[in-house]
Image (cartoon, helix red, strand yellow):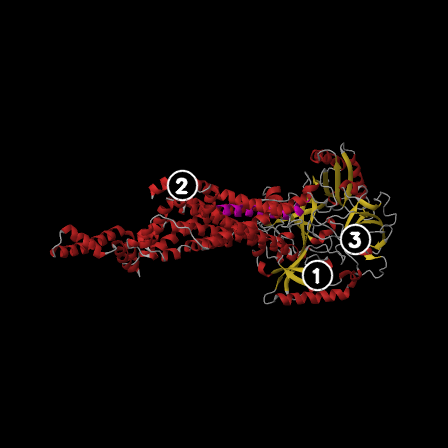
Amino acid sequence: MLAYLRNLGARLFRRDRIAEELEAELAAHIAHRADDLERAGLDRGEAERRARLEFGARERYKEESYESLGGKFVETLIQDVRFAVRVLRKSPGFVIAAVSTLALAIGANAVVFSVMNSFVLRPLNVPDAESLYELQRGSEASGFESYPNYLDLRDRNHTFDSVMAWNILSAGFDTGENPAREWIVEASGNYFDGLHLQPYLGRFFHASDERGSNSAPYIVLSYAFWHTRFRDDHGVIGRVVQLDRHPFTIIGVAPPLFHGTLLFFNPDIFVPIVNHSQLSPDDMNARDNRFIFMTMGHVKKGVTRAQAIADLNSIGKELETAYPKQVGKKTFSLASPSLYGDLLGGPVRTFLTGLMLLAGLILLAACANLASLFSSRAADRAREVALRLALGSNRRRILRGLFTEALLISLIGGALGLAGSVALLRALSRWQPFPRWPMQVPVDPDGRVYALALLLTLACGFFFGAVPIRQILRASPYEIVKAGTTGKARRGISFRDVLLVAQIAICGVLLTASLVAVRGLVRSLHGDYGIRLEDTMLVDTDLSMAGYSGERAPAMQKRMIEALETIPGVESVGLSDNVPLGDGASKTTIYTDATADLKPANAFAHPIVYNISPGYFHASGTHILAGRDFTWHDDEANPRVAIVNPEFARRLFGSSDSTIGRHFRLSDGTRAEIVGLAEQGMYQRLTEDLEAAIFLPIRQSPSTSTFLVVHSTRDPLNLTATMRARLRDLDAGLPVYIQTRLAEMGPILFGPRTASMALGVLGLMGFLLAITGVFGMAAYMVSKRLRELGIRIALGAQRREVLQSALGRAFKILAIGSAAGLVLGLLANRVLAFVVYQATPRDPLVLAGVVAAMALLGLIATWIPAQRALSADPLILLREE
């Protein structure tokens, strides 16, 4: 083996000497034959000529002789690459077009796949993530659970190694200066141990620290928060800070790569869940208070998913029997915790799958484009191939060279596309779409992304490199050389035509989808949501962060309203514990007035509920259709009242007529009288069906959660400093967040905006690829028929006839592909309907836009070939021939 390698190396690095020896040997054979012919009576010159003819293809014999020596593969590969580089250097336009096309396609697919990989395929960055599941309520596909139910699930199951619980909330974080609102995960004592994590600094809290309510005033900082807020200070361990005016001790820092157990949500602080009452007024021991955001656990080894679900369902049945009023129907399912199970994961997977399909269409369009370019290039090089075949080169060697060119272009394009996608993905990973929320998009590429890019690159290279195979295998040197440069018009449908039709159809689909998304986004910004978006600001805080509770909270809320109303230019101020189309919506349970047994099974509906102040409707721009608004006299000393929307009235009473004065029962059994009917709005997302909603007086349903809605006649942004100063005068330690009403809708608009941006980019890429494809075909057809067109012009043909003859085929293909793309785009609206407000490709403006775009595509792509066809000079063409 060693001797073989030594000989192989000698052959590889002494190629010049071997080539000289082969050349000398072949020359000797020819000289010996010439000597024989000379002795037969021929003169020396004729004898040498005859000897060379009898010997045949000298270069082929040299290749065959050299291959027989072995070690040819590497040398041949180097030769092929060198030859491919030399050939491609002669066609810089072709190389730029091909590389750019492939870079766009590979880059787009790498970006989309990396996003899908991060959100769907890649597990959480915790040990043993494959066995970690979220415990979802089977009827809701959500993980909300009460603390007592969690304890039962944790202690009574037989299929999980550990069951952990955690919740998201915000709290006022105060180190003695600049109090701020920070996002917190309150977690069960076994949270870190159950996830098999080790602290970066200090220690974690454990189950042993839980000794009752408020027994573990400890804080674990996230690594990023420790790095930015405390500047990597190792002395932070043991420091006492305040959360909502309660002292907590910092005991540790989480590892750098751990960002919590919700993929896109990066909390700042972790605290024990047993201290919930210090951070929230909710009763954590109430079995019907489902404040826990997610319950999750590791399934034991050897336990199947079905067995774990059956175990949980058996516990659920026991809880149904023991607590029928508080629990109700209780079944379970398991889901990945990374995207909050099916509630968020389903829509995200649907959208990303659709986006991946569209990116795949971009790749197909690029391959079709490149296949057409390579096929045309092979036709243009037919004379060169014929000469090489006539000189003795074998077809396999020619095909190998063409494949080398294709793979070389593919690798260059793939490398550029991957480099661009990596830069974009790293920028996306640093992007924070919502400044108020600690949310990031963790889409850093990994080995899967690089592997996919390499696979697509090689596949594309082999695909469009294989297109001219049939052309080469059937090439006849004699016929090609005899035909000269005279081109023939193609008849019938060719493979290139089919590719181009498919490419144009794909462009039509992408353009339709992108215009639908853009139109939907425009509607989302100018829709009727039952609230005013212009000239409105939101002041968001929670009074519990500054220690307000009981009677102090309502009094402070009224003082805040009065303080902001005195600002010049402010027309009205209202208050709510939450706002429509904001960060989230709370639901309540209601019963008909005749219901006596108030158990969950007898609940009539679960409408969205808002606790508001007088003047809220005026400030938010919501019209009261009937009845009256609340007053400050609607307090706990007076009967319960409510304002409802038309959908609530329709569900409860069958109609919104004669609703005023009727009653229903709240979750605690209290009767509430309907005193007003507010206009229908949108409350959770733009694509929702009609939702039932009720509004209750803030004085009758107190809440420390505070959203001040401020409507003014001045530019709201100019009021920010004044509003902040007025509120600081009331309490300097109260953290507030001020933004426009439209900015508050950022999470709601994130889906439509992302869809519009992504589909717009893909549509533009498809448009550019289609232009390249049509231009390549039109230019090729004109170049092949240029002599014929020149003769027609010389014989008096009209410009219209010349264009129809030269580009008629291209226009037919463009029309067929455009029609097919438009039809397919009309059928593809279901993918967009979930994320885009009122998405419909049947919008006349969308249809007109697609038709205009495809017409523009044809005009741009055929302009230069048309000018070349019309300027053909028959005298010059015939002289060149």
Relative side of 176 to 484, left or right: right
| Mark 3: secondary structure | helix
Relative side of 431 to 186, left or right: left
> Dot 3, crowdedness within 10 Å: few (<14), some or many (≥20)?
many
Relative side of 816 to 95, left or right: right
* Quarter placement of the N terminus: bottom left
Query: Which residue is drawn at the image coordinates 48% and 41% (left, top)?
Result: 863
- Residue 139 has which mark? 1
Q: Determine if residue 258 is in view.
A: yes
The part of the chain drawn in magenta is 745-772
- Residue 11 has which mark? none
Label 1 sits on what residue type?
A: Ser
Q: In terms of image quadrants, where is residue 437?
A: top right
Q: Going by the picture, which residue comes out furthest to the top?
A: 568
- Residue 794 has which mark? 2
Residue underneath mark 3: 648
For marks 3 and 1, the one nearer the N-term is: 1
Where residue 189 appears, as percent x and y from the top left, is: 67, 56
Label 3 sits on what residue type?
A: Phe
For marks 1 and 2, the one nearer the N-term is: 1
Relative side of 818 to 282, left or right: left
Where residue 226 appears, as percent x and y from the top left, is: 61, 45
Secondary structure predominantly adopted by residues drawn in magenta: helix
Question: In the image, which is nearer the foreground, mark 1 or mark 2?
Answer: 2
> Dot 1, crowdedness within 10 Å: few (<14), some or many (≥20)?
few
Label 2 sits on what residue type?
A: Ala
**Disc 2 + disc 3, Cβ < 8 Å:** no
